[in-house]
Amino acid sequence: MIAFDNVSKMYRGAPKPALSNVSITIGAGEFVFLVGASGSGKSSLLRLILKEDRPSAGEIHVLGQDLRRIPSRKVPLFRRSLGVVFQDFRLLPQKNVFDNVAYTLRVIGKSSGFIHDAVPDILQTVGLAQKAKNYPHELSGGEQQRVAIARAAVNKPAIMLADEPTGNLDPGTSAGIMNVLSRINASGTTVIMATHDSGIVDQMQRRVIEISGGRVVRDEDEGSYETSAIPLGELDTAPIPVITDEMAAVSPPTPLRSARAIDPDDVASPFPWELRA
Amino acid sequence: MVVSIVLVTFISLTFVGTAILLQAQITQMKSYWFDRAQVAVYMCTDFSTLGGCDQQGASADQKVAVEQRLQSATLAPYIERYYFEDRDQAFANFQDQFQDSAVSELVSPELLPETFWINLVDPEQSELMFEALSGLPGVESVIDQRSYLDQIFALLNAGSLTAVAVASLMLVAAALLIATTIRLSAFSRRRELAIMRLVGASNRFIQTPFVLEGIVAAAIGAALASLAMWGIVRVFVQGYLSDALPATVFIGTADAFATMPLLFATGIGLAVVASYISITRYLRA
């Protein structure tokens, strides 16, 4: 479903690679937590899956397609099979809940008949059937995030990417969001969720991929936010970073336990999710 | 924002249209006058010093020689018709032409040259007449009337070129303004655009409304410019100029209508290119 093969990503002007030699495989229907400190490369990884960026090295296959071989005019078509949810919801304030969700279907040219079937259906799934006529400012944060999830899921994407979807929400509301995501995952959608919320990760007991300094340092099925388990050994076997020798000198393989002591200023891109539009 | 596009395209297209109308006017005057322009072979008078004259009037023999030359096999095919104007006729014409002017009282028939007036089959070939006739004894000078007209046309041409130059500058400004406006318009809708891109709206779907915005604004500008063309011809040319200069032929509203498709094509073409490039660059940047 998603395969990274020795993927590295350098941002121009950044001294260290945002991702270096990442190789992961995520199968259909999986629920994966992406954990790691801010700036560790989670968002870069999600951007690469979305083909918002191209990798500096390595190959990425998503849904059986080599991302390098998708011409830019076919990218919109590719993105229709992905759903994305953000920490800040990104709803259109002048549209009500129904229209916010319907908007994504309209812009990809779905018939209004399809829209009037699919939108109430997905609002039911996220538990907002009663609020279809409300506007975003009339909703709580959790409800707004549900709208955003409904928007991402309404087209029945094969993959759903969520970048800290509970980052702005209280624990109780977060649990509700996780319920919705689990439900969507249960319907067959692969969910990849970047998060800092240790409570959620610990409770869900799903696959956890930890990234630190641009490297995968842990990949556990049914893992927790922090682990006492022996690392998978990625650190020891990971090849030297591709870029240059200097690069390797600046970013020596980081020991697992010190991963969270990473410099907070060491951020690859200040607004990694800021879409170029 | 859209109003600014409308105004700039309106003004620049008005300049384009004016340049076209000026050209039409020049063409019209050329075809009118060039058909009527004659070559004049002025014979010597007792007062003329130019050519081979030496202050002696052309003799009857010399006039016959010129006439024979005009009838000769080498020149005759190029000449549609010619006629001889003697002093009295020239004087009568002169009096007629300058009847209100003080000059008419200073001129007597002796001062005016006898003249062969030649209408050529092809007015472009006046050069032949110079070569064949200007050296003959008793001929003072050979003049193509078109040489007088050429100065007028040069002036009109310069005006037309100026209009074209101003128009091209204005068109560049219009294109830049359209690009900027579309970019601003896209920026003000960046939330929608970001979501559209995220959920996989096709590029054409995203771009079309912006290009349409440019087209509509430019079309309104072109419509205003077309109206201006009609107004210029109707009010200025037909209402004022043709009264002031009754002897001259002027363009009519048909010429104004002829410019309109061109104005629309220019304006809309410009808008499509400028807005498409602008929105495409915005989406890529």
Image (cartoon, coloured by chain):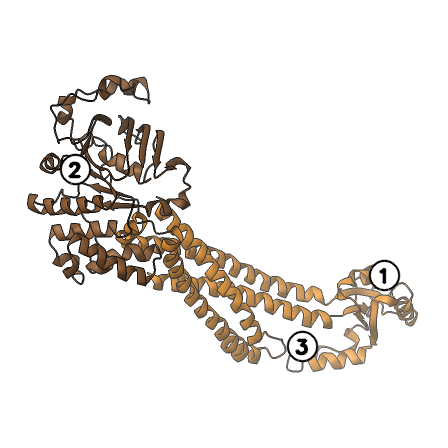
Chain colours: A brown, B orange
Label 3 CA crowd tier, 10 Å (few <14, some 14–19, many 20+): few
Q: Secondary structure at mark 3?
A: helix
Q: Residues within 10 Å of mark 2 (few under 14, many from 20)?
A: many
Mark 1 or mark 3, which has the lower sequence index?
3
On the image, the x and y values in percent for residue A132 come to 18, 61
Left or right relative to B20: residue A214: left
Residue named by callout 2: A195
Q: Are marks 3 and 2 in contact (CB under 8 Å)?
A: no
Determine the CA span between mark 1 and mark 2: 100 Å
Residue depicted at 15% across the width and 20% down the height? A230
- Image position, residue B201 (x, y; %): 34, 52
Quadrant for the C terminus of chain B in the image: top left
Towards the viewer: B10 or B26: B10
Amino acid type for the residue under numbered disc 1 = Ala
Question: What residue is pinned by disc 1?
Answer: B132
Q: Using the image as rendered, state which of residue A80 and residue B115 is in the foreground.
A: A80
Q: Secondary structure at mark 2?
A: loop
Residue position marked by numbered label 3 in the rendering = B103
